[in-house]
Image: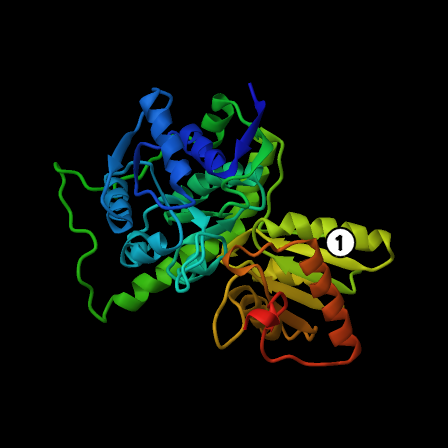
Amino acid sequence: MDKKVAIDGNSAIAEGVRLARAQVVAAYPITPQTPMVERVADFIDEGRLDAKYIAVESEHSALSAVVGAALMGTRTFTATAGAGLALMHEIVGVAAGNRLPIVMGIANRALPSPWSLQVDHSDTMAEKDMGWIQLYASNCQEALDYTLLAYRIGEEVRLPVMVCIDGFFLTHTTEVAELPDQEKVDRFLPAYDRGDVYLDPDNPMTINQLNSAETFTELRYAHNQALNEVINLFPKIAEEFKDIFGRQHSLCRDFECEDADVVVVTLGSSSGTARKVVQRMRANGMKAGALQVSCFRPFPKEDVIGKLKGAKSVAVIDRSWALGTDGPLSQEIKSAFHSAGIDIPIYNFVAGLGGRDLNEKTIENVIHSTVELVEKDEKRLYPIWIDVKKEVI
């Protein structure tokens, strides 16, 4: 029977791993991800999850271990944050290139330097083009649900998935969420079947061998096609998820966008804050809207264009940095609109770095600044760092 529980984001992903019946888990502790794998280890110790837990000496080894396990045809899980993900970089490519549906929980944490334990999306944005699916949750319920969706989608297209939650803002924040019944999960997510593509001592094969220029491009192309297939697959699986669990998920979630003068676009936990700000602004007569991008890779260009094309202007908030150019989310949206030949003013705002609160006041400032820029017909080639404290510089 489904039950409502008080749960934090780390535990929500851990519950998703338990319900998915992961078989091999390997991880190395790093703030703010550590409680996530501690909870998974507890499930194994308590006999609530029949899985092998591998204690390793680094994040590089953690991902390497689950790559090996996934090549044997097992359902796997690992987790990390910040510099831990950066240390995995080489194996991030190995996992994706070998088409292994590993699920990795990410407690988003700013990359150094300066050092920070707090959230921004620079860690996962540094890996955005490595061929993994990337899902960004805005609350603890989504963290759990996206973990289940990650296994189902990843195993269908044979690609790894990052389930990303904002460090501390979600990892250590307790909310009410619905924990689904195991029977329902088993219906949605049957046992993983890798077919005949796995390492078998009785039928040896070579995997991940050196490739020449004769085949490298074609393998990359096939990988890209599989990743893009997620755009078509996600809505179908999300509909099945809704039928079983009663909750709707989508590639991106729009709120009051249809007639908006300005739509603010976000990733992660700030999406709920943005909706609250929009609701209040609407009540005060301002036509604002909000768009939450849930699936960043592959980027859902058609969905985003469809939900934003009626807006008079767009404000994209990047909780990440791409020094010297636009933030990653802004780059995607501007590229999509340019390719589609749609001319809407799109402004990029950088905010919430290194754990700075991306709060209602900041989002209000973003919306008001966008309205002013449009009224002045002012163009901006570079991002606006909206929450910079000038006195600190």
Left/right of residue 318 with respect to residue 258 in the rendered view? left
Where is residue 214 drawn, in percent x and y?
23, 70
Q: Which residue is mark 1?
A: 278
Q: In the rendered picture of this protein, how many numbered marks are placed on residues?
A: 1
Residue 27's place in the image compared with 118, above or below, is above
- Image quarter where the N terminus lies is top right
Residue 121's place in the image compared with 336, above or below, is above
Identified at 77% across, 73% down, the residue is: 372
Q: Is residue 160 something that shows in the picture?
A: yes
Looking at numbered disc 1 in the image, what kind of residue is underneath it?
Val
Q: Is residue 309 something that shows in the picture?
A: no
Residue 341's place in the image compared with 200, above or below, is below
Where is residue 4 drawn, in percent x and y?
59, 25
From this viewpoint, which residue is outermost toward the front? 391
Left/right of residue 348 with respect to residue 189 in the rendered view? right
Q: Give 47 or 187, whichever is nearer the viewer.
A: 47
Where is residue 9 drawn, in percent x and y?
51, 38
Identified at 64% across, 63% down, the residue is: 305
Q: Give 7 or 357, whichever is nearer the viewer.
A: 357
Identified at 80% across, 55% down, the residue is: 281
Q: Give 240 or 176, whichever is nearer the viewer.
A: 176
**Colour scheme shown:** rainbow
**SS assignment at label 1:** helix
Q: Give 393 or 238, whichever is nearer the viewer.
A: 393
